[in-house]
Image: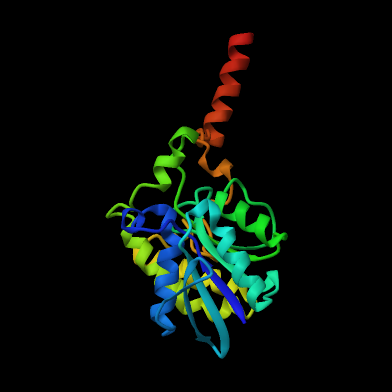
Amino acid sequence: MRLLVGLGNPGPKHRDNRHNIGFKAADEIVRRHNLSAPRSRFQSDTFEGTIDGEKVLLLKPTTFMNESGRAVGEAARFFKIPTEDIVIIYDEIDLAAGKVRVKRGGGHAGHNGIRNIVEHLGSPDFVRVRLGVGHPGDKEKVHGHVLSNFSKQDKKWVEPELEALAQALPALLAGRDSDFMSQVTMAVQQATGKGRKPDAKPIGETSTKTSRQDDAPVEPAQPQQSSLGAALNRALSKFRGS
């Protein structure tokens, strides 16, 4: 069994907060893969089913974000799920909005939910799906930023990202992290029109200028004297010198 966890804060007040993008991802996974109706246990709303033939348990902890580890630890111990088979989906302010990164193991990077999960599991070696929500640019504004709702502009990438995440989830569960990230990234780029810009010069095109020397001004050619004119000048010179 694989344990999937979307992080967020419970209650309608926080439903559309940036901090709740993990909950939103969980909801889309439930919808896309037809998981069970919610059941209240492990201090969470839990959903069960199979994804690409693999049995999964999905959690939306009903604790607040900074106590998410209570739910994750309880479920992992009950089903004896190894830490490396746990996937945590959450918001990341150190990634630009719409970016996604997968990381296996590592530190908590100041995220209180991840910090608490590490404490309760006793190991950091779970899979992290980090969904960028952008940074407000000032450390003092971070709290307000993550607890504020997504803007109308944000929704242009949020919904396509979450749909793609749920669709590409089998690749992640199979350990194909790059494939998973590529599929999600492509969906966001197509939705926002921010795909790869074409090169300024197509590959294989050569310039008509071969070097910077071609740009230098060319001195006009001086007219050449005829041979007859040169002979007359020599004769005049001899006459004047006599």
In percent of width and height, residue 36 lies at 43, 83
Residue toward you, 180 or 48:
48
Coloring applied to the structure: rainbow
In percent of width and height, residue 209 lies at 52, 51
Query: Would you identify the image quadrant in which residue 176 lies?
Result: bottom right
Image quarter (top left, top right, bottom left or bottom right) of the N terminus: bottom right
Extreme bottom residue here? Answer: 53
All told, the count of numbered labels is: 0
Tell me if I can see residue 196 in this picture. Answer: no
Residue toward you, 68 or 240:
68
In percent of width and height, residue 29 lies at 44, 76
Question: Which residue is at a point 53% across and 48% down the rendered structure image?
Answer: 94
In percent of width and height, residue 17 lies at 37, 53
Residue toward you, 201 or 9:
9
| In this picture, residue 86 sits left or right of residue 203 | right
| In this picture, residue 5 sits left or right of residue 109 | left
In this picture, is 61 found above or below 215?
below
Question: Which residue is at a point 50% across and 65% down the rendered structure image?
Answer: 43
Extreme left residue here? Answer: 152
Tell me if I can see residue 69 in this picture. Answer: yes
Image quarter (top left, top right, bottom left or bottom right) of the C terminus: top right
In this picture, is 140 found above or below 187?
above
In this picture, is 111 found above or below 223?
below
Question: Which residue is at a point 46% across and 33% down the rendered structure image?
Answer: 140
| In this picture, residue 203 sits left or right of residue 77 | left
Residue toward you, 109 or 57:
57
